[in-house]
Amino acid sequence: MKTLNDYNFNNQKALIRVDFNVPLNTDFEVTDATRIQAAKPTIIKILEDGGSCILMSHLGRPKGVEDQYSLRHIVDKVTEVLGVKVTFVADCIGDEVATAVAKLQPGEILLLENLRFYGEEKSGDVGFAEKLAAWGDVYVNDAFGTAHRAHASTAVIAQFFPEHKCFGSLLAQEIDSIDKVLNNSEKPVTAILGGAKVSSKIGIVENILEKVDHIIIGGGMTFTFIKALGGAIGNSLVEDDKLDLALEILEKAKANNTEIHLPVDALIADAFANDANTQLVATNEIPEGWMGLDVGPGTTKKFAEVIANSKTILWNGPLGVFEMENFSKGTISLGEAIATATANGAFSLVGGGDSVAAVKQFGFADKVSYVSTGGGAMLESLEGKTLPGIEAIIG
Ligand code: AMP
């Protein structure tokens, strides 16, 4: 795996695909600069080597040129986070960029306009990729968030840098973290899968079944398993067409000596609302008219014991409807258990959508080993798929 450390960027122009798809408020101010922060080590290493950086990214889902998606809105924030002045160019191909790139000196940074102002970016157009490729001596991919897309700037472009392409330090870290969990893991390995539906996690379960020792199931998908096992789940979330699949997973796990841990108690509610009436019951004894919206204290205790004995932990998906305060306790307790295990030497990776949001919201981001920056890319990696953005660098 070629990384930044394999290059000396002295006098080199590095063309870097970053993921600056950051949230903006109605005044076009950046409300969460995590993704800009995440790209900083790569950019600073290149500048410190004596190189210059040409940053390219997408922002949102524009249909053609739409000012609300212009990357000019984020220039000040990028300058602030990097501590180096960033010059914006109002296009990503063409004469204006050519002039700016020709003038670019070591230590300087250019930020190009939104790649997705051109439909050719998403369609993976080779000609467009070649135009972008003209701007750099070395291509660096540091955009994990889009590594699962075969777009012009994330994958297609790499063919124009047969000898001069590498991963940025963020992307290298993401690859390394997944590897530490799935391939080079210290045992016992525990995967916690929560969230809404079995159907969105099935690819992950199938890929990890043979690689992990324990799978903890939580969240809405619990009830598909409980119903498949003959339990009463009341009005809880369920996928009736996945009942056989749930049983199949349990069988396969048994055959692989992978222990599956299901919640034993549930905090149930008489409505999908924070102020609904609640009761604590066994997960398989939920009355009609009630639904499980969080795990109960018995489950929390049981899961914490498994986690305390794990050396490697993967967490994807909340254990309950954590967005509502009254149903967030299970997810918070899980975060605490993972934080404690991490402090005691375990490696913990949190990845994929809502668990990342939960970890940030409840203040665990600094207490786990690694929080992934990519939602879809992380899920596809955990499903065992080779990501086009990664393959393009390795290949
Ligand atoms: P996912 O994107 O699949 O990880 O699902 C995350 C969503 O699952 C969050 O919005 C949670 O509110 C939701 N969720 C977690 N537990 C439950 C539950 N018991 N019933 C319904 N939704 C849930």
Image (spheres, rainbow, N blue to C red):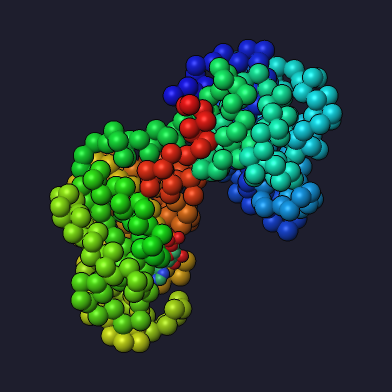
Identify the residue at image location x=81%, y=38%.
90
Identify the residue at image location x=63%, y=35%.
153
**Percent coordinates x, y for residue 251 in the rendering:** 18, 59
Whether residue 343 can be seen here: no
Identify the residue at image location x=35%, y=87%.
289
Whether residue 10 can be seen here: yes
User: In which image quadrant can residue 16 be found?
Assistant: top right
Depth order, front residue of 152/238 = 152
Please state if 72 lies on the left or on the right of 368 as rendered: right
Ligand 1 rendered quadrant: bottom left
**Percent coordinates x, y for residue 29 in the rendering:** 71, 50
Tell me if residue 9 comes above or below residue 386 in the rendering.
Answer: above
Tell me if residue 258 comes above or below residue 326 in the rendering.
Answer: above
User: In which image quadrant can residue 296 be found?
Assistant: bottom left
Question: How many numbered tags mark residues here?
Answer: 0
Depth order, front residue of 266/328 = 266
Q: Quadrant of the N terminus?
A: top left
**Percent coordinates x, y for residue 375 in the rendering:** 49, 49
Residue at far front of view: 126
Identify the residue at image location x=60%, y=15%.
9
**Percent coordinates x, y for residue 7 in the rendering:** 54, 15
Tell me if residue 117 comes above or below residue 220 in the rendering.
Answer: above
